[in-house]
Image (spheres, rainbow, N blue to C red):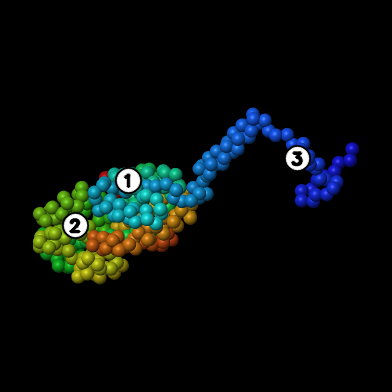
Amino acid sequence: MQQRSIRFGQASAATALPVAPASAVRPLSAASRRWATWAGGALVAVAMWMAGTAPAGAQAYPSRPVKLIAPYAAGGPTDAMARLLAVEMAKSLGQPVVVENRPGASGAIGADVVAKSPPDGYTVCFCTTGPTVLMPLLEPKLPYALRDLAPVGLVHRVELSILLGPKQAAKNIAELIAYAKANPGKVSFASPGAGSPNHMAGELLKTMGGVDIMHIPYKGEQPAMIDLIGGQADMMVGSIFIGEPQVKAGKLRMIAVTGPTRAPRYPEVPTVADTISGYEATSHVGLHVPAGTPADIIEKLNVAMKAAVAQPNVTEKMLSDGITPLATGVQEYEAYLQREIEKWKRVIKQNGIKLD
């Protein structure tokens, strides 16, 4: 038997199919109509289900609230800044940004929550230097690795301060270094804890200044400051605003800040780098998402973060707290993190720093 092939789009008399006249078309029975209605509804339901379960990048982001993990306790300065940023980011994203506190292990618990979340942009870390730089270098049993967190952008930088108590007579960094060199091992510096950015700032001063100074770790800044005032330590590396009341009262002296430039809040206080060229030891806050989050989602979060930091109320709050607003792009933040990791890796190795 001869076979004829039919090619779509090329109708002819030889290939046209017969069409029944309208009078010959029989109406559907009631049962058939019910089945057709059910089948059509089922197809619509399947289509809606498929749309709801499509990959994150396949539908508009965000389509529900975004969770911002603050890896520190509620009520503290990091938490307060996270909540301020969340309000402003929500305006750009068109969805609520809800702050959730997950404190503990110098920020590592909160960072681990984010690292193990789905990479869909709905869980973001308001991460500081601890969980993104120092803890991965100091804690070999950390439950996550740096590669598990994708950077979104650098929000701000926090300068630290060098505070001297009544035990130490030096008036500036140069005099402090000279005294420490003349009295090796006798100068002590207090910090709020081993492995903190404050501790690392003191270790960097030790390395770059070529001095032998002893670290005294405390459980927080307040106990460290009390002992500094009491003469149990020579100096303290503290948050830039922590000692302000005591400085004004004449009980402590702020002789330097640790950032690359003078702090807007204390323009009269020199930087350590004014004496020791190249010295820089700051803390930071940046946004991170789980590794594997689509690039377009990361970009949306970055744009929302930049818009939030640019708001006058946010900028003014940062500056009043001694914080430097930055709001960088993704690549800038990646480069910054790499520089920080390499710097602190060298300091940790050279000074043999380990967590107890």
The one nearer the camera, 329 or 93, is 93
Q: What residue do we see at 34% from left, 56% from top?
A: 88
Q: Earlier in the sequence, mark 3 or mark 1?
A: 3
Report crowding for label 2: few under 14, some 14 to 19, many 20 or more residues within 10 A (C-alpha): some
Q: Earlier in the sequence, mark 2 or mark 1?
A: 1
Q: What residue do we see at 55% from left, 38% from top?
A: 45
Q: What residue do we see at 39% from left, 57% from top?
A: 92
Q: Position of residue 327 (x, y in %)?
A: 36, 61
Which quadrant holds residue 286?
A: bottom left
Q: Which residue is mark 2?
A: 242
Q: Is residue 246 visible?
A: yes
Q: Which amino acid lies under the numbered mark 3 shown in the image of this protein?
A: Ala
- Residue lying farthest front? 23
Q: Position of residue 220 (x, y in %)?
A: 20, 49
Asked if residue 170 lies left or right of residue 282, the reply is left
The one nearer the camera, 249 or 168, is 249
Depicted 338 relative to depicted 289: above or below? below
Q: Earlier in the sequence, mark 2 or mark 3?
A: 3
The one nearer the camera, 319 or 240, is 319
Q: Quadrant of the N terminus?
A: top right
Q: Which residue is mark 1?
A: 100
Q: Which residue is mark 3?
A: 22
> Closer to the observer: label 3 or label 1?
3
As measured in the structure, the alpha-carbon distance from the residue carrying label 3 to the one carrying label 1 is 66 Å
Asked if residue 310 lies left or right of residue 6, the reply is left
- SS type, badge 2: loop
Q: Which amino acid lies under the numbered mark 2 shown in the image of this protein?
A: Ile
Q: Position of residue 77 (x, y in %)?
A: 25, 53
